[in-house]
Image: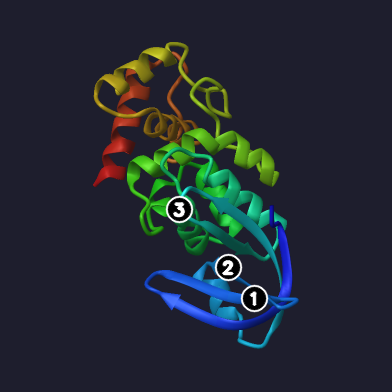
């Protein structure tokens, strides 16, 4: 398995949305795909060191290059998610710097994630749900609370399960509900309602969700 390469760039190629370099390593040329941002920073004839993820399938062997093990490991976390292939993972890393990407996933920032080419709302939701805790822990940041954990302030209503169930019946998914409860708890819509006022929590969540979808 190839994990790291050092050599001289002998060729740069842009094919559609894909950006490659050919790296001469002791007389062997390795074709490596990069984000466009990284590709633009390199010049032919430049000696570079690149951390590599090697993807092998029935049709091809592909190499994807990164500046650090940190970047490569975030990429590997992304492609663990069902429906997120190597090209989608690279698109996410092109759209966001590593720390920005970690924060977007941890905080459930679907709008930010959906700016990446090929990432739709459902894929963004899977990223935020499946990687929320693991990618945050991996990067050393605190993940946004899950529904099961409640909100950080501890002000979630005693009948919080009923609020969640009602919003779910109205067609909202778990991630949207979690973000709404978190927003109301943190006071983004004014002082949080009393913990036992289920109707007030429900109204606040619905108002927040309505504005998000506008």
Residue 213 higher or lower than 75, as above or below: above
Query: Callout 1: few (<14), some (14-19), or many (20+) C-alpha neighbours within 10 Å?
Result: many
In percent of width and height, residue 57 lies at: 50, 48
Is residue 113 visible in the rendered image? The answer is: yes
Q: Nearer the viewer, residue 70 or 102?
A: 70
Secondary element at tag 3: loop
Residue under circle 2? 32
| Viewer-side label of 3, 2 | 3
Residue under circle 3? 59
Mark closer to the chain start, 2 or 1: 1
Q: Nearer the viewer, residue 72 or 193?
A: 72
* Mark 3 touches mark 1? (CB < 8 Å): no
Q: CA distance from mark 3 to mark 1?
A: 22 Å
Secondary element at tag 1: strand
In percent of width and height, residue 112 lies at: 43, 54
Q: How many marks?
A: 3
Is residue 187 visible in the rendered image? The answer is: no
User: What residue is drawn where x is 70% and y is 44%?
Assistant: 140
Figure colour scheme: rainbow
* Mark 2 touches mark 1? (CB < 8 Å): yes
Query: Callout 2: few (<14), some (14-19), or many (20+) C-alpha neighbours within 10 Å?
Result: many
Residue 23: image tag: 1
Residue 162 higher or lower than 108, as above or below: above
**Residue 43 quadrant:** bottom right
């Amino acid at each position: 398995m190839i994990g790291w390469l050092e050599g001289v760039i002998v060729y740069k190629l842009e094919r559609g949305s894909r950006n490659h370099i050919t790296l001469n390593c002791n007389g062997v040329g390795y074709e490596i795909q990069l984000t466009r941002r990284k590709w633009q920073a390199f010049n032919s004839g430049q000696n570079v060191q690149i951390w590599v993820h090697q993807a092998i399938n029935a049709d091809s062997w592909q190499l994807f290059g990164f500046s650090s093990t940190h970047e490569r490991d975030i990429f590997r976390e992304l492609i663990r998610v069902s429906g997120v292939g190597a090209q989608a993972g690279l698109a996410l890393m092109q759209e966001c710097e590593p720390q920005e990407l970690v924060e977007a996933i941890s905080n459930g920032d679907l709008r930010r994630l959906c700016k990446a080419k090929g990432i739709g709302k459902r894929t963004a939701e899977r990223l935020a749900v499946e990687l929320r805790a693991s990618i945050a822990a991996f990067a050393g940041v605190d993940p946004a609370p899950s529904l099961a954990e409640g909100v950080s302030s501890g002000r979630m209503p005693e009948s919080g399960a009923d609020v969640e169930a009602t919003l779910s019946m109205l067609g909202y998914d778990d991630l949207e509900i979690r973000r709404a409860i978190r927003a109301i708890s943190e006071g983004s819509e004014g002082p949080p309602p009393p913990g036992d006022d289920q109707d007030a929590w429900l109204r606040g969540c619905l108002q927040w969700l309505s504005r998000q979808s506008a």
